[in-house]
Amino acid sequence: EETAKVKHNYQSDVARLRKIVINSLYSHQEIFLRELISNANDALEKLRLVSLTDKSVWDGSNPLNITIKAVKDEDGKGGRLIISDTGIGMSPEELTNNLGTLAKSGTSDFLAKAEGGDTTATGNLIGAFGLGFYSSFLVADRVEVASIPPRSEKNPQPVQHVFSSSADDSTFDVYPDPRGNTLGRGTEITLFLKPDASEYLEEATLSALVNKHSAFSSSFPIYLFERWTEEVPDESEVPVPTDTETTSAAEASSTPTSEDVDVDEAIVEDITKEEEKIIEPPAPKMINVTKEQWTRLNSQPPLWARDPKNITEDEYNLFYTSFFKDFDKPLAWQHFSGDASSGTAFKALLFFPSKLGEDFWQKPLEYRAKDIKLMVKRVFITSDLGDNSLPQWASWVKVVIDAEDLPLNVSRETLQSNRFMKQLRAMIIKRMIQLFTKIMEGDDEKKADKLQEVFGSVIKLGAVEDQRNREKLASLARFTTNQRNNTSFDKYLENRKKGQKQIFYLAEIGKKPEDLAQSIFIEKLHARGYEVFLLTEPLDEILIGHLREWKGIPFQDVAKAGLKFGDEDLDPEEEKEEKKELEEKFQPLVSYLKERIGDTVRDVVLSERLVKSPCAIVADAGGYTANVAKMMAAANAKGNRGGILHEYAMKAKVLEINPRSPLIEGLLRRVKDLPTDEDEKDLDAEEELKEVTSILIDGALVRSGFEVPDSNKFFTRVDRVLRRSLGVSETAEAKVEVRPAPPVEPELPTQEELVNDGKPGVILPDELKDKISLEMEEIDEDGNVVPQHDEL
Ligand SMILES: Nc1ncnc2c1ncn2[C@@H]1O[C@H](COP(=O)(O)OP(=O)(O)OP(=O)(O)O)[C@@H](O)[C@H]1O
């Protein structure tokens, strides 16, 4: 060849990706066709977009389409598959950059995962990530891409180039196409199929595959080259008179050679001859002719333009997976049309995926919608809504929307200020909430559960983020309570007790609802049959903080002061009397504790919320609950101190004691027994009581989810109390004899010492130690084994 080939090395990520593709996606071989068609479709869309502003690129006359042609080798075994488009094409630089490098962010992480054998990653690989061009190597040993950009003012003399690569090369070549400009414009991808991929040479297979995966993925026509043979009367021949001899002569010409005819066929032939003698006149002479034709595969109008009544579930699923390149079927969809108030008629399809991509949760606040495909009269315009982009919580939704009468040749900037575009955002969100509601209120419980599983957090995020739709989204949010799962705020209110003027909740991030249900803060509520929301997700408490109330009823953190059952007024007289008595009775203990509590808590009160537990630490209305204190501590560890307010909030806690707990009664007795007279002071008893009190307060902190201020002291105290109850001396120390380490040894060990000492760096399990002997070889700088010296 005259033309110089330029050899390039693949960027290392490409080499890795190709390897993963070839090794791990073997069972998904067939996706290559969908990926290549999708690339061709993109190239055609780009051409059409460019031509809106530069007519020299495409004047609208010559066709925009995708063609597929299979060419079998002469020997009938292998062959080539050629996929062409008349799109934007690629210059030699673009061939090198687009096909030789991976420009996508997050690729490396992704590849590492897939290489580590993460099988969910392989599914994502096809879906979220998209393999694009590299999927060619699933079916091809070698791929040649010939491409030429359109003639334009900037590039008046484009030259058709070829990118060529084998599946196992670490390099690729780019060179001028020796055939010259055969394409005119666009790209032609030739796959030299692997021996085990020869099924993709069958037109029926190809046609079925396009119908399955790609029929909807392009609005440009996709043509398949079909070639078949037909038996037709040979019109070139003069009609033959009924003459047996000519017939057998004609037959002889189309019969295989004698070597090919086996015995069975010879017999069949005999029978045929017999029959011929009976049937007169003989059939006209037939010949085989080869017929060829380009058949359009995707002649149906796009799915969104069709009547929903005539569309099957399968069709929606297939459309979704191919159009949005998702590996999994959608969870739900809505097909709708209408006239926006701007006067623009449109048809639209909205899908909920069956899971949220990892990239969404990694950075939900930076995530931008990328799957809102705006079409005008079936022509793709943009998926960039610019300033009208969806709020984060909704940005994962997948929508195709086809407007009838938007001006086609407007720039993207003017498009964004178009009224229709401004309405689009609100319209999509409205439909999303509608679809959420429909599923939540529908009969399909499984689907509703799945919806909560996948989108539960997103709904809560929306309720926090989207003030306008807060009510609606919050009403879709579901929580676990001490009584049931999947409870909405409305359902909670239906279950409210008479007089109850608060919605009770308890929050601790990361805890399991079952564990939270054991909390001392809900002991009494639970025992009395009140329902309490158990909030365990980070967004839950934030949402409640934003809402403050539901239908006029305020939320009450049950770990905070201010909890009211609401039926206190209904308390019988005697109970009120009893309460007063208790307060008087426990007054000495309360006073004693108030002296002892120091900095940890602000006040000591008799508890209304405890049933079995002796005491609890409850946050003031303005203070931090244990949950918030933990989050603040984590934030402070990163260096931002909250100042005085923070200090205050950390300390704004109250110790509640349970007058019905025997432990507290016992404590009261001890306090009362303390001699008050200076002379009679029993220092031991005083000290003991102090210790017991400290343990009780610390225990209350831990039980209530807080940290003890000094865990060392705490355990020393516990230790002392244990000794006392075991009758062990409180001062006796552990008998210890510590042998000091041998003296300092600055010399490094010799090789021999090391070798004899169980071979450094190689650790064998005990049971193998005497079965395996390791032989050490010395290796010189060039990597050769140095001959061992004879042992003396
Ligand atoms: N038929 C084509 N015509 C013109 N350019 C193409 C064609 N096929 C691929 N390209 C170019 O090569 C680039 C890389 O293609 P590839 O299929 O690997 O990834 P992609 O299409 O960008 O991403 P994805 O397949 O995930 O959507 C494309 O972005 C495009 O610029």
Image (cartoon, grey):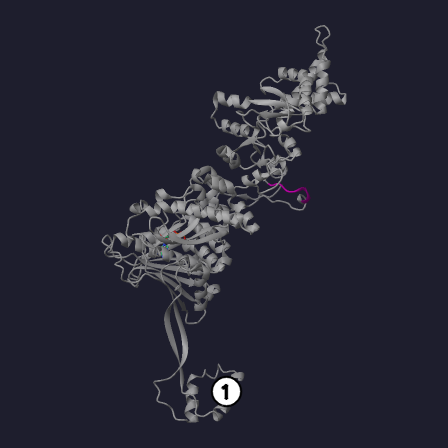
Q: Secondary structure at mark 1?
A: helix
Q: Amino acid at mark 1?
A: Glu
Q: Nearer the viewer, residue 461 or 636?
A: 461
x then y, percent, for residue 539: 51, 37
Q: Which residues are magenta?
A: 762-767
The reply to whether the magenta stretch includes residue 511 is no
Q: Nearer the viewer, residue 67 or 656?
A: 656
Q: Residues within 10 Å of mark 1 (few under 14, many from 20)?
A: few
Residue 503's image quarter?
top right
Say which residue appears at 62% left-offset and 15% top-offset: 595
- Outermost residue toward the right in this view: 727
- Considering depth in this image, is 194 or 602 the residue closer to the camera? 602
Q: Quadrant of residue 686?
A: top right
In the rendered image, residue 31, in percent from the top left (x then y), is placed at 46, 58
Q: Quadrant of the N terminus?
A: bottom left
Which residue does the image show at 70% across and 6% down from the upper left?
678
- Provide the major secondary structure of the magenta segment: loop
Q: Position of residue 311 (x, y in %)?
A: 46, 60
Q: Is mark 1 within 8 Å of ligand 1?
A: no
Residue 538 relative to residue 681: left or right: left
| Camera sees residue 736 | no
Q: Which residue is mark 1?
A: 269
Q: The C terminus lies in which quarter of the figure?
A: top right
